[in-house]
Image: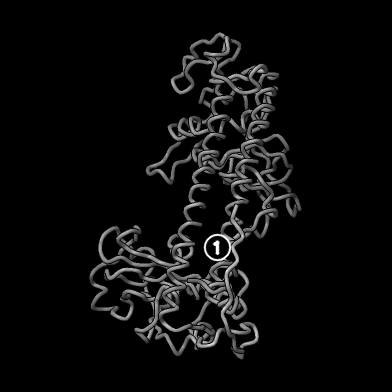
Amino acid sequence: MTKTITYPKYPAYKDSCVEWLGEIPEGWELARFRNIFRFSKGLNITKQDLEDTGIPCINYGEIHSKYGFEVDPSRHLLKCVSNKYIETSSKSIIQYGDFIFADTSEDIEGSGNFTYLNCDQIAFAGYHTIIARLKKSDTNTRFVAYVIDSLSFRTQIRQAVKGVKVYSITNSILKNTVLWFPPLPEQTVIANFLDDKCAKIDRAIAQKEKLIALLKERKQIVIQNAVTGKTVWSEEAQAFVPVAESGVEVKDSGVEWIGEIPVGWEVKRVKNLFKLIVDPAPLNNDMELLSIYTNIGVRPRKDLEQKGNRASTTDGYWKVEEGDFIVNKLLAWMGAIGLSEYKGVTSPAYDILRPITDLDGHFFHLLFRTKICSLELKKHSRGIMEMRLRLYFDRFGSIKVAVPALEEQKRIVKQVFTESKKIDQAITLQQTQIDKLREYKATLIDSAVRAKIKVS
């Protein structure tokens, strides 16, 4: 994937007198963060203060999730704050080359996440941020950004932060970190080298991420077409083929969102396939706590990292049997509906549906989570605004779905799982390559800024 390139070493090194840093080239210098930066804080605001127009504002959450180590309001879409803050919060105004750190992180790896302003446009640092401004103008800002982004620098912060669920990055932690600098011309050479190499790596990553998106879309299309009768499995082709090319006779379902279906399929209402179950769990139970997720379906809560509050008791929760469906009424139209392969309990905010006829639960799990079915679920959901729509069983039960014979359901599920597995393997391969590229990029940055290699 990446060629092994051998770079030369520097002609002479000296002891940095910092144990973990080891030797640095002759002519390089060390400095404490406090000696080259001044500090201030971001705006004392909340998310509710953010607007679509006004002065761009660089916020805590977006530092973690959006920008990477540089941000330019002319290229990145930023939430804004009102002009009134210019007079009342001048210390939170940032300028070209300022570094903005998120002052907390939900995991140790995010400790030290930052961005720097790479333009001359006026902007603000937002809530939960620390502003660090270089004191000296004869420093290459981009070189400093690569140093701060390096594994070596971040390790200093990760070893200093304290926390369990939230890790705080304070001024004092930053002030005590060590940075290292070659002469200014060499800073520029290293920064330019890394710009070129990292841009190429980022382009390769972007191409693979695009391919992953296409593969995921392909997987959804395969599933949707199979469970709605738009394709059938061909033993000769060893693939799903369009019904029109299969020789299978079709008929009009009489339902707009379903369209034509193979002869032999039936149209049934959900309430003729499932019934609503209300079965409270016993007091002081120790049953498995289950939840429904839009991306992965039903899972035991203990198997997934949970942030936020946990249920202190499951008294009064609904009992769930293997083969039941859990429906999050609020998010059903977004895919939060699925087959449970576990016995346990779940929140009374959810509906529990139990089959009342012979069917393959996996078939309906796939069907209910398709995009076309989700649109139908949304139409039958009630609420005054999109994010408050609820799908109650009286409306869900009235929805018509296309149902093949039980044996056909099983065949479809088997072949869909086989095809999905192939696509998942292709996605995993691409993701593995992305991980290796990111690891290579991190190693290259660290090697260049720590003078393990000499670049030109």
The percent coordinates of residue 316 (x first, y second) are: 66, 49
The percent coordinates of residue 161 (x first, y second) are: 58, 78
**Closest to the observer: 124 or 84?**
124
What secondary structure is found at the residue carrying circle 1?
helix
**Closest to the observer: 298 or 438?**
438
Name the colour scheme: one colour
**Closest to the observer: 228 or 341?**
228
Query: For mark 1, what is the residue?
Result: 441
Residue at left offset 44%, top offset 71%: 191
The percent coordinates of residue 151 (x first, y second) are: 58, 72
Q: Is residue 211 visible in the rendered structure shown here?
A: yes
Q: What is the number of callouts on the image?
A: 1
Residue at left offset 64%, top offset 82%: 20
Report which quarter residue 436 is drawn in: bottom right
Left or right of 214 on screen, residue 264 = right
Left or right of 143 on screen, residue 429 = right
Residue at left offset 51%, top offset 39%: 214
Three-letter amino acid code at disc 1?
Lys
Whether 88 is drawn above or below 303: the answer is: below
Whether 271 is drawn above or below 34: the answer is: above
Report which quarter residue 160 is drawn in: bottom right
Q: Is residue 167 visible in the rendered structure shown here?
A: no
The percent coordinates of residue 256 (x first, y second) are: 44, 20
Please rate how many residues cluster around mark 1, counting C-alpha atoms within 10 Å: few if below 14, some from 14 to 19, many from 20.
many
